[in-house]
Amino acid sequence: MAKAKPVAKNSAPRRVRRTPEEARTLALASARRMLLADGPNAITLQSVATDLGMSHTNLIHHFGSAAGLQSELMRQMMSELTAAIESAVMRLRAGKGEFRDFVDIVFDVFDRGGAGRLAAWIVLSGEASRLAPVGEVVRDSIDSVERGADPGVAAHDVHQRVTSATLLVTMAALGDAIIGNQLRRMVGRERDAVRKIIGKLLPVVLEREASNG
């Protein structure tokens, strides 16, 4: 019987050749897993490179730096939020959804999706300008709602209602993602308490904005 060839010790793991698009997609997926498991500080080029068997240089080529990777991850999450909001708005227009559905979508992205923690970390790092994707998704969401508004309502009035609703839900979702768990435990409230409150407040805010228009 032929002897098996000895396996070389301490051999480096063989890297898989990937297209640039595949590399970016996998890197962002890895960064998101790290964000949810260990927080924003865990997202480094070296940790992602090690996770995927890529070279550190390869990731520098795609993202420039860890900050670039984090910003691109935020952009990806906000893009997903835009699509989800547009879907919720269409359901509301068709009478198939409720305000609470809209609230849940935004809260899920900032809480379970990790966007809230990442956004807070970016701001506290003194890099608030990297939150441009959040502004983009807010503007896109406002534009989407305004395009489907009743043509009999003045554009200014529509804008006031939509911006008020967007600010209310987004700020509440961000705050809940960052400190909601601690505050809820302090006052003895259930996990979705803030969602319920915002879901009830949202139609009131829209109605008040309409009457003040």
Image (cartoon, rainbow, N blue to C red):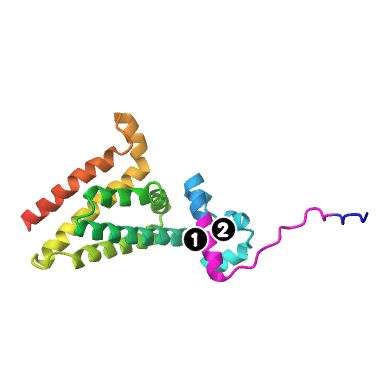
For the point 55% across and 66% down, the residue is 22
Q: Marks 1 and 2: in contact by CB < 8 Å?
A: yes
Which element type, helix, strand or loop, lies under badge 1?
helix
Image quadrant where one finds the C terminus: bottom left
Viewer-nearest residue: 164 or 20: 20
Where is residue 48? Give x, y as percent: 57, 56
Q: Give the magenta range.
A: 7-30
Amino acid type indicated by mark 1:
Leu
Relative horizontal placement of residue 37, taking residue 190 as reference (left or right): right
Where is residue 153? Give x, y as percent: 9, 64
Image quadrant where one finds the N terminus: bottom right
Quarter of the rendering containing residue 194: top left
Which element type, helix, strand or loop, lies under badge 2?
helix
As drawn, 39 above or below 61:
above
| Residue for badge 2 | 45
For the point 14% across and 62% down, the residue is 158
Q: Count neighbours of disc 1 (C-alpha within 10 A) and say few if under 14, some if 14 to 19, many if 20 or more.
A: many
Where is residue 105? Give x, y as percent: 32, 51
| Residue for badge 1 | 69
Viewer-nearest residue: 41 or 108: 108
Q: Is residue 115 visible?
A: yes
Work out which residue is located at the far right of the displayed protein and give it: 1
Relative horizontal placement of residue 138, taking residue 50 as reference (left or right): left
Residue 116 painted magenta: no
Q: Report how many numbered discs are placed on residues in the image.
A: 2
Quarter of the rendering containing residue 195: top left
Q: How far apart are the alpha carbons under marks 2 and 1?
A: 8 Å
Where is residue 20? Give x, y as percent: 55, 70
Work out which residue is located at the far front of the displayed protein and give it: 1
For the point 29% across and 32% down, the residue is 189
